[in-house]
Image (cartoon, rainbow, N blue to C red):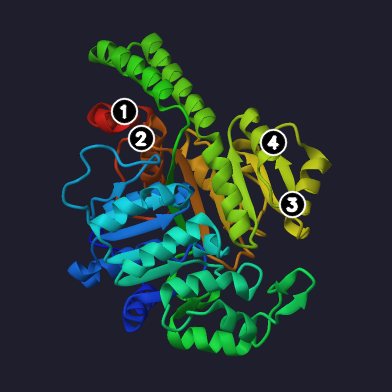
């Protein structure tokens, strides 16, 4: 996916971009999770150039900063909107890309309409299943002004055809103007004593054919597997709940570091540095817990796949076990041994109702097979890159038929984000050692993390 250090689309992604253009930028891009819908959309905006902008991307709060990060990777400088009202000083030239989450969209409608919309992007458009919800009405208003509309979802039809109509109406109001006509054609309506019931389904083959002919681009993972590498990694920035608390701790730490780093550290001072970094990482874990839970629940709600979540501390495992949904869980940590350990593995591998395995990186990261899932999420990061790679490979083993996706859920603008960068660089070094290729001499992750913090303090404390 890279070409001389630059991101480059896979063949199926290029085909999808061309398909969007064939629909004149009004299309439902229904690709499975992990196939790159975000980058496909950003490349489409780039290709259409000035006709696409200003672009407004509406998405769930859990992926807002993923959009920001991916846009920056290919050269955009997006604006991310927060809160319930525009701040003073936002009356200048509109940014090329504005990112906002569904929860606050209704408060920003006048501001967005006033600045104009070239392209409206509706990520996870199945969030618009209710015709009467505030978020759906807000998106309808934006869609009326937008020249182009791109709706994204791996599962645009969650339960019944009636839930798809709001998205279709926003995309092509010329073809899907009347819910009544749509419902009587495809929803098998029934008249009850309380009014019409549109929870049914009918003529689904005709609906599918019409969607493919007029606006939908559909690709499943199995359709694109030949193009994908066997394993892919993604750093997912998530928000923390108390930025001031983190900044206070980080500022104190960096002040201390500046005072003592000149001596190139005696062993006792080095130990104190490690202690302080460890404290910040534990603080990140606690402050990002809600965002991690939301990400996991969104994953489970938006597809029927299983998920492996790796942690370090027992408190994080217990919190995720209580708050993450999706049916039964398998727990694998240091306290689960012998037959109980194998029983937990077998339960995850064989029981369709057990969709989540939550494990400790050290206890569950070696010696077991979890190929019932092709998605791994790291709720906490371990110091040793090799341990993280081994944990990923619990899913990437013989018997795995899908590309394995490893998501590093990292606290945005914190030391953890810097650690994720260093870990991934070291993982590439380790892979070069195993498979051949150039290797650097420095394998000291702690010293490299200090260098990252020293050269990039503004981003850390933003």
Question: Which residue is the site of mark 2?
Answer: 413
Question: Which residue is the site of mark 4?
Answer: 333
Question: Which residue is the site of mark 1?
Answer: 461
- Left or right of 342? Residue 208 is left
Looking at this view, is 392 or 114 the one in front? 114
x then y, percent, for residue 59: 44, 55
Looking at this view, is 139 or 41 the one in front? 139
Depth check, mark 3 against mark 4: the one in front is: 3
Q: Mark 2 to mark 1: distance in Å?
A: 6 Å
Give the structural element (helix, strand or loop) at label 1. loop
Q: Mark 3 to mark 2: distance in Å?
A: 33 Å
Q: Mark 4 to mark 1: distance in Å?
A: 33 Å
- Count residues near mark 4 (Cα–Cα under 10 Å), then give few for <14, some for 14-19, many for 20+: many
Q: Mark 2 to mark 4: distance in Å?
A: 29 Å
If you read the primary sequence from the N terminus, does the residue marked by circle 2 or circle 4 appear first?
4
Label pair 2/1, CB-CB below 8 angstroms: yes
């Amino acid at each position: 996916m890279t070409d001389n250090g630059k991101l480059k689309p896979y063949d199926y992604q290029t085909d999808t971009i061309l398909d969007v253009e064939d629909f004149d930028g009004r299309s439902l891009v229904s690709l499975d999770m992990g196939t790159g819908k975000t980058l496909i959309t950003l490349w489409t905006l780039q290709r259409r150039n000035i006709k696409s902008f200003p672009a407004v991307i509406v998405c769930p709060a859990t992926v807002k900063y993923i959009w920001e990060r991916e846009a920056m990777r290919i050269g955009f400088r997006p604006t991310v909107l927060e809160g319930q009202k525009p701040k003073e000083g936002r009356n200048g030239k509109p940014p090329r890309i504005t990112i906002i989450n569904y929860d606050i969209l209704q408060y920003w409608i006048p501001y967005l309409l006033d600045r104009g919309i070239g392209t409206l992007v509706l990520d996870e458009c199945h969030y618009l299943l209710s015709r009467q919800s505030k978020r759906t009405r807000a998106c309808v208003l934006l869609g009326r002004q937008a020249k182009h509309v791109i709706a994204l979802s791996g599962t645009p039809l969650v339960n019944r055809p009636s839930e798809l109509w709001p998205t279709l109406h926003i995309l092509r109001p010329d073809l899907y103007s009347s819910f009544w006509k749509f419902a009587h054609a495809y929803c098998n309506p029934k008249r009850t004593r309380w009014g019409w019931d549109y929870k049914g389904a009918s003529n689904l083959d005709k609906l599918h054919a019409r969607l493919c002919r007029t606006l939908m681009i559909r690709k499943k993972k199995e359709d694109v597997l030949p193009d994908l590498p066997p394993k892919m990694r993604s750093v997912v920035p998530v928000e923390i709940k108390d930025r001031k608390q983190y900044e206070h701790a980080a500022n104190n730490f960096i002040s201390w570091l500046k005072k003592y780093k000149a001596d190139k550290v005696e062993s006792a001072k080095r130990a104190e540095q490690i202690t302080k970094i460890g404290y910040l990482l534990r603080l990140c874990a606690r402050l990002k817990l809600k965002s991690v839970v939301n990400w996991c629940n969104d994953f489970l709600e938006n597809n029927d796949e299983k998920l492996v979540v790796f942690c370090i501390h027992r408190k994080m495992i217990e919190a995720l076990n209580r708050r993450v949904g999706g049916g039964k869980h398998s727990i694998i940590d240091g306290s689960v041994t012998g037959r109980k350990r194998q029983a937990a593995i077998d339960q995850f591998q064989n029981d369709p109702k057990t969709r989540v395995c939550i494990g400790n990186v050290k206890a569950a990261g070696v010696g077991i097979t979890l190929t019932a899932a092709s998605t791994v999420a790291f709720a906490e990061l371990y110091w040793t890159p090799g341990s993280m790679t081994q944990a990923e490979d619990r899913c990437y083993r013989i018997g795995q038929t899908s590309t394995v996706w490893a998501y590093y859920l990292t606290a945005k603008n914190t030391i953890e984000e810097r650690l994720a960068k260093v870990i991934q660089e070291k993982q590439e070094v380790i892979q070069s050692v195993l498979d051949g290729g150039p290797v650097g001499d420095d394998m000291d992750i702690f010293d490299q993390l200090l260098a990252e913090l020293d050269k990039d303090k503004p981003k850390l404390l933003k």
